[in-house]
Structure formats: C-alpha cells, structure tokens
Image (cartoon, rainbow, N blue to C red):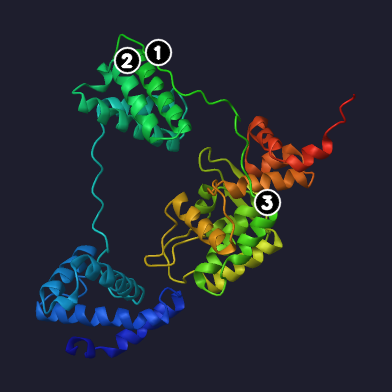
Amino acid sequence: MKAWRRDPQRFSEVRRVWERNRCVAPASISVYRYWICRFTDYCSSEHLDEHAELTRSGVRRFAAWWRSEGSPRHGRLPSTLNSSRSALRAWSFALGILGVKVPPWDSPALRPPPVSTTMAAFAVYLKEVRGNPPQTIHKKLAHMALFAAHCRKRHRAMHRARLQDIDEFIVACRERYARTTVSDICSTVRGFQRFLCTTGRSRRDLSAAIIGPVIRVNERPHRALPWKAVQRILRAVDRSCSKGQRDYALLLMMSVYGLGSGEVIGLTLEDVNWQAQTLRIVRPKTRVEFILPLLPSVGRALVSYLRHGRPQHSTSRNLFITMRTPFKRLACSVTVRHILHSAASRAGVTASFMGTHVLRHTHACRQLELGATPKIIGDILGHRDPDSTSAYLRVATDRLRAMALPVPV
C-alpha cells in the first residue's frame, strides 16, 4: 500500500472522472481501489513503469504474478484476471482523460490472414459484376470459408470440387443451420461456380445442378408483437440508471420509427438536428439517407439519455455507446437483441421470434392498422420495392378482417 499512499489525490481525481461518466457504481469503487493498490505495489516491487504496464498484456502479467504470490486464497488465474482487468482498464481510461500519457489498452490489431487470390477475385466479382454491398460480400465470403474447410477435409481445392462434394456440404449445412440459411449458402456456392466458369478457372459450370431448399417469397408472414406488449416492454426498462436511460431511448426509437438494429447502431450525434427537429437515418446496406421528424417523446428520451445517461468522456461519436470503458459504439445486433430480451423478460413478454426486427415488423403492422398508406410506411422503413412493404399486409389481421366482404350463399 505504500506506493498507493504516495499520490492519494490522483485517486480522488480519477473517482470524479468515474462519477461524471456514470460508469462505476459506488459499490464497485472500493473493489477497483483494491486492485489498483495491488497493481501499484506490484509495479513498485518489480521495478516497472506503472503507466507502461496499463495494457491488456500487462494486466495479464500482473494477474499471473498475483496468483503466484501468497496463499491459494488469491483464487484461480481466470477469476483474478477478470476481476482486475475491469478495474485497471477503468483506471487507465480515467488517467488518459486527466492528461496522463498511457499506452493503448489493446495491442495493435494483427493483420487478418491474407485471403487466397481466388477469394479476392471472387470478392471483386461480387462487387463489380453482381453489385453486392460490402455486408453481402462479407457474408458470402464467410459461406465460402465454410465450403473451403469442407473441401480441405477431402483434400480437394475449391475450384476442383465435384458435385458430390457440394452435395455433401449442403447436407452437412442442413443438419446445422436453418432452412433459410442453407438456401442462402446454396446461392453463394452457385454464384461461386458461375464465377469460376466466367473467369476461365473451371471448364464446368455446376451452378445449375446445385439445388437448395425452396424458400417461397413471403411464405411466412413477418411476425409482430401486439402494441400493448411493446408498451409493456418500454415501461419495464429501469430508467433510474444510466444504462436504462440508454436502453429506453434505443428501444423507443426502434418502436416508433421501425428502425433496425444496424440503423440504431450507426446513429451518430450529428444525425440529430435539434434546431430542425429532424433525425437523419442511413440504411446500412444501401447507404441511402432519409430524414424523419424528431417526435417529442423521442426527443425527451434522447435529452434525458444525453444529460443523465451517456458517459461524458468518450471518443466515439455514435449516439448509443457501451456503458463500460472504453465507451465505444455498440458491437452488433446481438447487443441490441440482448437489450430487447432483458426488457421483455422483465415485462413478462415471451415470444419465440424475439429478434431485433420484431419491433420493426410491429411498427409496420401498427401503422397499417392506424390507416397509413403502404407508400408512407415503405418510405419510413426505407423500402425501395413496394413488394417489401406488401408483406406486412398479411399480418394486419384485424384490419383485413374488417375489410372482408360477405360471401353470398
């Protein structure tokens, strides 16, 4: 503890940063202080620069040292590492805010392994010939990575795969993935076979012989929740804490605007025009921009979140960010789905289809029931094809029942 007592004012400054950022609960501060004390003592005893050791690898070395010192009460290495890492990462972040020069927490990202020349050419083909957006290209390359692993087990190159190899791959995928996913994988493999034949990498075009599960357009209506269930979910969010302020604003925007998880994750502080009372939305796949009015309820939720929920010190310009250091943008749709599931569980709302698009489908059905025209709904949802909006007509059952004509007898 001697090394800690040399600078007691530093902890007071760091604590004020934590309190302003609302990122550390009062009960956690004593735990954080415990690990910070032990870390400074470790650096002093080992003659290390305590600021230079504030990295992910440095904390791992500290946890190994702490586990090797003393009695078994120090616990296992994984638990020691998990306990100390949160405290020391928050410590490093706060020191950086206070102007102390600390190294990046994570080591420079390693370059991803180079893709094969065939896969690189296939990616170019998908972009320039097929016109696929980056998200679709990434998904198709992931499909081909699965197919490449399947071919390696049979000691065969992808461009020389036989139809029997492809059939075995599809059967294996069917045992693991849903029917729609398998159909998507089959589409990727067919496109790859056309690419091989078009570019002269193969003399055989096997694309016509690759048969996947038949998925009819709109064979299953979009599934939506009753509007009262959505209201219960929103009321179940605990807005007394910072995380609850964020979750409520996020779920409210998805409910009243029909936004998808990708659109919510991509929102930035600059997308909210407070003077014009508008909200700029960018479709993730097509990058199409459209402007929506900033509704009063949404504006109040955002103001409450920005004033009392969002951490003050963050380098991210994203509107919704994580509530733990280093306060970066939400990772993916899985994070949004977890927020939705947590609120639905507290509200007692259960459904087998509780995915991130359920609020989008519910919004569209709600607008149809209120009498909005499909054209307006399609514009709000960002649909370029009217058929995409017509799918929601099949789930507005109450409205369809009212429109039913009597059958003559």
Q: Are marks 3 and 1 in contact (CB under 8 Å)?
A: no
SS at circle 3: loop
Q: Quadrant of the C terminus?
A: top right
Q: In the displayed structure, would residue 377 be above or below residue 2?
A: above
Q: Nearer the viewer, mark 2 or mark 3?
A: 3
Residue furthest front in the image: 409
Label 2 – label 3 distance at C-alpha: 47 Å
Work out whether residue 108 or residue 406 is closer to the camera in this orientation and state it. 406
At 57% from the left and 66% from the top, the residue drawn is: 237
Is residue 376 among what the camera can see? yes
Work out whether residue 110 or residue 149 is closer to the camera in this orientation and state it. 149
Residue at which label 2 appears: 163
Q: Could you say where residue 133 lies in the image, as x and y percent from the top left?
A: 46, 34
Q: In the displayed structure, would residue 75 be above or below residue 174?
A: below
Residue at which label 1 appears: 209
Q: Is residue 303 left or right of residue 369?
A: left
Q: In the displayed structure, would residue 255 be above or below residue 373?
A: below
> How many numbered circles does the render carry?
3
Q: Which mark is residue 226?
A: 3
Residue furthest top in the image: 203
Q: Quadrant of residue 101?
A: bottom left
Q: Earlier in the sequence, mark 2 or mark 3?
A: 2
Q: Are marks 2 and 1 in contact (CB under 8 Å)?
A: yes
